Amino acid sequence: MERVVGTVVRGLRCPIINKGDNIEEIVVDSVLKAAEVEKLTINDRDIVTITESIVARAQDNYATVDHIAKDVQSKFGDDTIGVIFPILSRNRFAICLRGIAKGAAKKIVLMLAIHLMKSAITLSILTHLMKRASTLGRTF
């Protein structure tokens, strides 16, 4: 039999994960419900993965904007802060940059690769951040 379909990936909607939640139970229940509703077959050797953020949230092991701001302030004080070629993955960069902006004394230098400047998401994040930074008395 010729194989004509490669790897298939499906994202599943799960409940919001909170500190202390049993993620094993939530994931199993979510996969089984999706299989039933969408009429999917779960086969031997199928792989189920979850993001690291789900585990961190269940373990209450993540940094908030305030945590990042406090850390930046304690390490850099009144110095100008440079953020050079950050990885703009999903929402993490926005959260980190908000924390840096909140903890920075006055000025942040942000250097992006030229191809990233074309991204609508990047431009949206930067526009929002610059507006927010100006209300905090920060400059970019």
Image (cartoon, grey):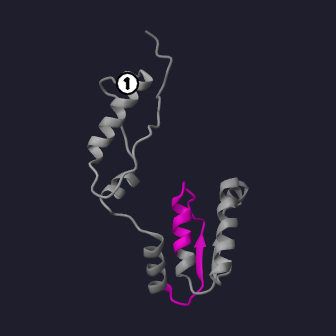
Disc 1 secondary structure class: helix
Locate residue 47: give its quadrant. Answer: top left
- Please determine whether, in this image, residue 46 is positioned above or below residue 70: above
- Please determine whether, in this image, residue 119 is positioned above or below residue 104: above
- Residue at the image point whose x is 36% and y is 30% from the top: 33
* Percent x, y of residue 136: 62, 81
- Residue at the image point whose x is 47% and y is 29% from the top: 8
Locate residue 42: give its quadrant. Answer: top left
Magenta stretch holds residue 84: yes
Q: Residues within 10 Å of mark 1 (few under 14, many from 20)?
A: few
Locate residue 102: give its quadrant. Answer: bottom right
The quadrant of the picture occupied by the N terminus is top left
Which residue is farthest top? 1
* Percent x, y of residue 17: 36, 51
Which residue is farthest bottom? 78
Q: Name the residue beneath numbered marker 1.
A: 36
- Please determine whether, in this image, residue 8 is positioned above or below residue 75: above
The quadrant of the picture occupied by the C terminus is bottom right
How many labels were placed on the picture? 1
Compared across the picture, whether 45 is left or right of 100 comes to left
* Percent x, y of residue 71: 44, 79
Magenta stretch holds residue 109: no
Compared across the picture, whether 119 is left or right of 43 comes to right
Give the residue type at disc 1: Glu
Bounds of the magenta span?
76-99
* Percent x, y of residue 45: 31, 27
